[in-house]
Amino acid sequence: MTNEIKRVFGYFTIADWEREQNWLTEMSEQGWRFVKTNGFFYTFERCVPERVAYRLDYSGLRRGDRGDYYAMFRDYGWEYLQDINGFSYFRKPADGVSKEELELFSDGESRIKMVKKFLVAKMPLIYLLFIAQLLLNWDNIRNVTEKLLHGESLQFGECVLLLVLAFLVVFLIFITVQSANAYRRVKKEYQKRA
């Protein structure tokens, strides 16, 4: 088998961790073992097609405090791969392993807590970045708004500013709705199982 490498663009939002896990598993079944990601581009190496379970977990721990956390997963047969955006990536061979052994969480409440922990840690940061962008461009936004109210035409840079701000607003709404829906879905799914 050659040491063939493939890089693939993949975009998964905060709420898509399960879809990302499934995609990584499918890639292994197609003969592409996950190596690493930067959050947008995924690196795979050619391998013999295999059944491997990939799981993501958000611990909320600082980098220096994760030694026991990784050791716990290792004790249960999980191979640690990397951390990105607070999520830890793990892999485990799936052949001959029960479905329960392929889950990181022993109960639904633990999964709900993981999602909540992530949303509480990351969503305020997203809102803060948006507010900072508004504050940094406040004078420009005010000038563009006055021009629009008076029917004046906008310069190219002002149009770009409006498009960027509109994109940020749409993105913020999208992430908020998707994250809230993911939390509700996980909560409903695991409360049903209880």
Image (cartoon, grey):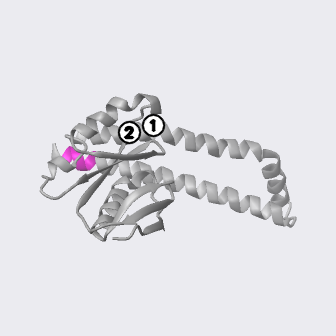
Q: Residue at x 27, y 34 (%)?
A: 72
Residue type indicated by callout 2: Lys
What main secondary structure does the magenta stretch of the protein show? helix
Around disc 2, counting alpha carbons within 10 Å, would you say few (fewer than 14), some (14 to 19), or many (20 or more)?
A: some
Residue 188 lies in magenta, yes or no? yes
Q: Regarding mark 2 in the picture, which secondary structure is present there?
A: helix
Q: Residue at x 81, y 49 (%)?
A: 142
Pick the front one: 82 or 120:
82
> Label 2 belongs to which residue?
116
Q: Quadrant of residue 61?
A: top left
The residues tagged by marks 2 and 1 sit, at their Cα atoms, a distance apart of 6 Å
Q: Regarding mark 1 in the picture, which secondary structure is present there?
A: helix
Residue 174 lies in magenta, yes or no? no
Looking at the image, residue 107 sits to the left or right of residue 122; the answer is left
- Name the quadrant of the C terminus: top left
Count of marks, rendered view: 2
Q: Are marks 2 and 1 in contact (CB under 8 Å)?
A: yes
Q: Residue at x 69, y 59 (%)?
A: 164
Looking at the image, residue 45 sits to the left or right of residue 169; the answer is left
Percent x, y of residue 26: 30, 66
The disc at residue 120 is: 1
Tell me: residue 68, above or below residue 51: above
Q: Residue at x 32, y 29 (%)?
A: 68
Residue type indicated by callout 1: Val
- Name the quadrant of the N terminus: bottom left
Percent x, y of residue 95: 16, 59
From which residue to which does the magenta span run?
Answer: 187-192
Looking at the image, residue 146 sits to the left or right of residue 64; the answer is right
The disc at residue 188 is: none
